Image: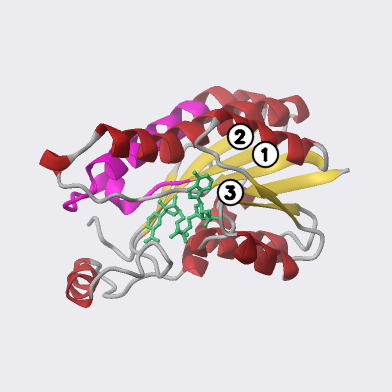
Amino acid sequence: MSDIAVVTGASGGIGAAVARLIHEKSGGQLKLCLHYNGNHEAAEAVSAGIPGSFIVKADLSAPEGRKALLEAVLAQGTPYALVNNAGIDRPHEPALMVTEEAFDKIVATNLKAPLFLMRDFAKEMARAEAGVIVNVSSVLARKAVIGSAVYRASKAALEALTKQFAHELGPKGVRVAAVAPGFIETAMTAAIPEEQRAAIRKDAALGTFGSPEAVAEAVWHAIENQYLNGAVIAVDGGMTL
Ligand SMILES: NC(=O)c1ccc[n+]([C@@H]2O[C@H](COP(=O)([O-])OP(=O)(O)OC[C@H]3O[C@@H](n4cnc5c(N)ncnc54)[C@H](OP(=O)(O)O)[C@@H]3O)[C@@H](O)[C@H]2O)c1
C-alpha cells in the first residue's frame, strides 16, 4: 500500500501535464491515480508514460462516480494528494440565454464534484494527518467573458470552498489551495476562432496562451510547499492586472 496522488480529468490537457509532473517531482514516491470520464484512449496513453499509475473511469458529476473513485483509490493505498482538475466550460450561453440544464450540468461537474470529493478524500487525509488538495479554478472567476456566466460562478464558488476547507482542515494536517489558469492550449480552448484568440492574447500582459505544463508547475508548488494553505495561485500571463 502506498501514498497516492489522485488527478481528476487526467485524460485532458492540464490533468495529463499535472500527473506527469507529480510523478517526476515526487521521484515516483506518489503513485498516480489517473481519473478519466469518456476518453479511455487518452487516459491509457498518459498511464503508459507513468510507471505504477492506474486509471479509473468515473462520471464525477454523479455521487456513484465519486464513490467509485474513492473506493478505487482506497483499494490501492492512502490518498495524499487530490487534484480536482476535471471540468467543463460548455455550453457558452450569454447572460440572457442561460438555461437551467446548463446550470445543472456545469455546477454538478465544476462545483458539486470537487466539493464532495474534498469532503470524502479529506476524511481519509485527516485520519492520516497528512494531505493536500488542489482545486483547478480559472481566470474567469475574476473576469467577464460573454457566455461564461455559469462557468464563472462555478469557479468563483470553488475558490470560496477552497478557502473554507483550508480554514477547517488546516488544524487536521490537510492543506487546500487552488490554481487559477488563464487561457491554456488544450482541447477546451482549441475551437476558439482566431479573431477571438488574438483578442485573448492581447488581454494577457505576456501576449500568449499558456501551456498545461505552466499550470502543472503551480499545482506542484501547492502540493510541495508545506506552509501554503488557502491560496489561489494565478497562472494567467497577467490577465487580471
Ligand atoms: N484550458 C483552459 O484554458 C483553462 C483555463 C482555466 C481553467 N481551466 C480548467 O482546467 C481544468 C482542465 O481543463 P483542460 O483545459 O485540461 O480541459 P480538457 O482537456 O477538456 O479536459 C477536461 C477533463 O475533464 C474531464 N471531465 C469532463 N466532464 C467530466 C465529468 N462529468 N466527470 C469526470 N470527468 C469529467 C474530462 O474527461 P474525459 O475527456 O475523459 O471525458 C477531461 O479529462 C478544468 O477544470 C478547466 O475548467 C482550463
Closer to the camera in the image, 137 or 174: 137
**Which residue is situated farthest in the left direction here?**
96
Q: Quadrant of residue 34?
A: bottom right
Labels 1 and 3 touching (C-beta < 8 A): yes
Distance from the alpha carbon under mark 1 to that under mark 3: 9 Å
The residue that disc 2 covers is 66
In terms of sequence position, does the residue under pointer 2 or pointer 3 come before the other?
A: 3
Residue 96 on image: x %, y %: 11, 40
Q: Quadrant of residue 131?
A: top right
Closer to the camera in the image, 162 or 34: 34
Q: What's under tag 1, amino acid-wise?
A: Leu
Residue 78 on image: x %, y %: 78, 38
Which structural element holds mark 3?
loop
Magenta stretch: give its range. 136-165
The residue drawn where x is 76% and y is 53% is 30
Query: Per the image, is 163 magenta?
Result: yes
The residue that disc 3 covers is 8
| Count of residue discs | 3
Q: What's under tag 3, amino acid-wise?
A: Thr
Circle 2 crowding by C-alpha within 10 Å: few under 14, some 14–19, many from 20: some
Which structural element holds mark 1?
helix
Magenta span: helix, strand or loop, mainly? Answer: helix
Tell me if residue 132 comes above or below residue 193 in the rendering. Answer: above
